[in-house]
Image: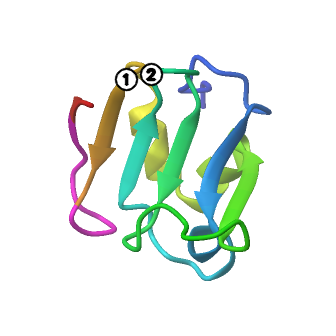
């Protein structure tokens, strides 16, 4: 499979303990306008504390959830979300 993101597979991204350690599904994705960073969060949203936050490689997020590859073309400054683990992604400018 071709790499679906314009960013390198080894770029760091932000996520949460629930997604990485507990198997929570990714509900919300942000491609931040200010720095181009990626954020992948579960239904609980952005982590409340540093203890809940995780910094991982983009390639590892695709190992956790291969459907994230469908967001490789999400423009900087946009967000995507879905209502269920297997639901379609919705997108809009932030």
Question: Which residues, given as a range, are shown in magenta?
Answer: 83-91
Residue 87, magenta (yes or no): yes
Q: Position of residue 2 (x, y in %)?
A: 60, 24
Would you say 73 lies left or right of 9 here? left
Q: Position of residue 82 (x, y in %)?
A: 25, 57
Q: Position of residue 68 (x, y in %)?
A: 47, 46
Q: Position of residue 37 (x, y in %)?
A: 59, 30
Residue 30 is marked as none
Would you say 51 lies left or right of 31 here? right
| Pointer 1 with pointer 2, Cβ within 8 A | yes
- Decide which of tag 1 and tag 2 comes sooner along the chain: 2
Looking at the rendered image, the quarter that the N terminus falls into is: top right
The crowding category of the residue bearing disc 1, from other C-alpha atoms within 10 Å (few below 14, some 14 to 19, many at least 20), is some
Residue in the picture at 47% in, 59% down: 41
Q: Which residue is mark 1?
A: 77
Q: Which residue is mark 2?
A: 33
Vertical side of 28 occupied by 90: above or below: above
């Amino acid at each position: 499979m071709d790499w679906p993101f314009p960013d390198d597979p080894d770029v760091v991204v932000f996520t949460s303990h629930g997604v990485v350690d507990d198997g929570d599904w990714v509900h919300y994705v942000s491609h931040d306008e200010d720095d181009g960073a990626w954020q992948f969060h579960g239904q609980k949203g952005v982590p409340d504390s540093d203890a809940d936050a995780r910094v991982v490689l983009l390639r590892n997020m695709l190992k956790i959830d291969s459907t994230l590859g469908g967001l490789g073309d999400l423009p900087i400054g946009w967000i995507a979300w879905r209502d269920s683990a297997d639901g379609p992604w919705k997108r809009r400018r932030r």
